[in-house]
Amino acid sequence: MQIHEENGASGGRYHATIDGTTAEMTFSRASPSLIIIDHTLVPDALRGQGVGQTLALHAVEAARAGGWKIIPLCPFFKAQLDRHPDWQDILKT
């Protein structure tokens, strides 16, 4: 699955389209070193395929590569952080 990124001055999204259906994770940029993950949308047609998990992992890897931290406002992303203690390094404390 290929994740695409869209970035603007104040935020952006990570998204993947599978068989014409798009899932996304949106974020706001609070500063050059801090983003806020605020929403994840996985349509019913893509549920159970690991799409949300892949979007979350992409966000973690992007944060590590970019040297920034994440504030997780999105309930789905918060749940993923709880399931992955090895992701705690990107969490804004």
Image: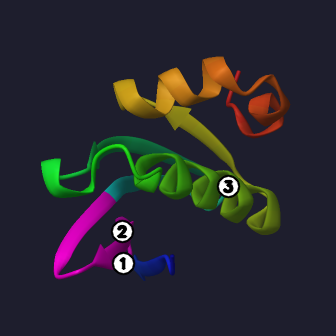
Residue 17 counted in the magenta span: yes
Residue behind mark 3: 33
Secondary structure found at label 3: loop
* Residue at the image position 67 percent from the left and 51 percent from the top: 60
Secondary structure found at label 1: loop
Amino acid of disc 2 = Gly
* Residue at the image position 71 percent from the left and 21 percent from the top: 93
Residue behind mark 1: 8
* Crowdedness near tag 2: few (<14), some (14–19) or many (≥20) residues, C-alpha within 10 Å: some
Above or below — where is 46 with respect to 14? above
Going from the N terminus, do you reach mark 3 or mark 1 first?
A: 1
Q: Are marks 2 and 1 in contact (CB under 8 Å)?
A: yes
Above or below — where is 92 with respect to 54? above
What is the magenta range? Answer: 9-24
Residue behind mark 2: 12
Decide if residue 10 is on the left or right side of residue 21: right
Amino acid of disc 3 = Ser
Identify the image quadrant of residue 48. Answer: top left
* Crowdedness near tag 1: few (<14), some (14–19) or many (≥20) residues, C-alpha within 10 Å: few
Magenta span: helix, strand or loop, mainly?
strand
Q: Are marks 3 and 1 in contact (CB under 8 Å)?
A: no
Looking at this view, is 59 or 17 the one in front? 17
Going from the N terminus, do you reach mark 2 or mark 3 first?
A: 2
Q: State how far apart marks 2 and 1 are (Cα).
A: 6 Å
Decide if residue 30 is on the left or right side of residue 45: right
